[in-house]
Image (cartoon, helix red, strand yellow):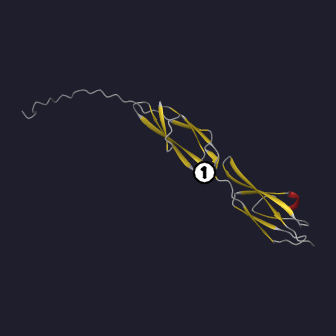
Amino acid sequence: DLSCGISNSPTPVSVTVIPLPTISIVADHTVVCSGNTVNLNTNGASSYTWIPQGSNLTSISLTPTSQITQTIIGSDGTCTNTAEILIDVVPYPDVSVNYFPGPACYASVITFTAFGAQNYTWSPAINLTSTSGTLVSSVPLLQSSTFTIMAENVNGTVSCINQKAFSVNILPA
């Protein structure tokens, strides 16, 4: 007999499939200005580990300065699963302004150029021919003046603003 005592009839085996826990992460914001706080909450398991923080709480707060992918590992005691969420970070503008001429003579028109942001708003409007854009000009200036530029970086509905004041000295007539 070539079967060597092995039966050709299969022996039934019972297999229990345990579903993975369904883990989710909820963020109060998925796009923030650099250095602002993001609160994250998780659910779907009985124990958790946030990566890379190592925290085992259901909620954590982050203060990202660049884009991050936050991961959570959740366990129901038998099986584990993971979830991820991407947090985009919008930098605050590092605005700089150049102007010409400098020093300026009495009744000079000054041309201002801004760098470091997506959008610009200039003030005071009374001393400018335009109040928005990278390049603006003054009206003829009769005295030294202080100008303010509001620089903005935007991602969707998140607007990160930085403001800078600077003075233009006018030489006496």
Q: Compared to 59, does 168 lie above or below?
A: below
Quarter of the rendering occupied by the C terminus: bottom right
Q: Residue at x 58, y 46 (%)?
A: 87
Report if residue 130 is visible in the image.
no
Residue found 89% across the figure and 66% down from its top: 141
Give the image location of residue 78, x and y in percent.
Answer: 39, 31
Who's the residue at 10% across and 30% down the image? 5
Image: 94 above or below 107: above
Residue 17 percent location from the top left of the image = 36, 30
Q: Please, what is the three-letter code of the amino acid marked with disc 1?
A: Thr
Q: Residue furthest left?
A: 1
Q: Position of residue 163 (x, y in %)?
A: 75, 55
Residue that badge 1 annotates: 65
Residue drawn at the location 34% of the way across and 28% of the way down: 16
Image quadrant holding the N terminus, namely top left
Judge left or right: residue 28 versus residue 5.
right
SS at mark 1?
loop
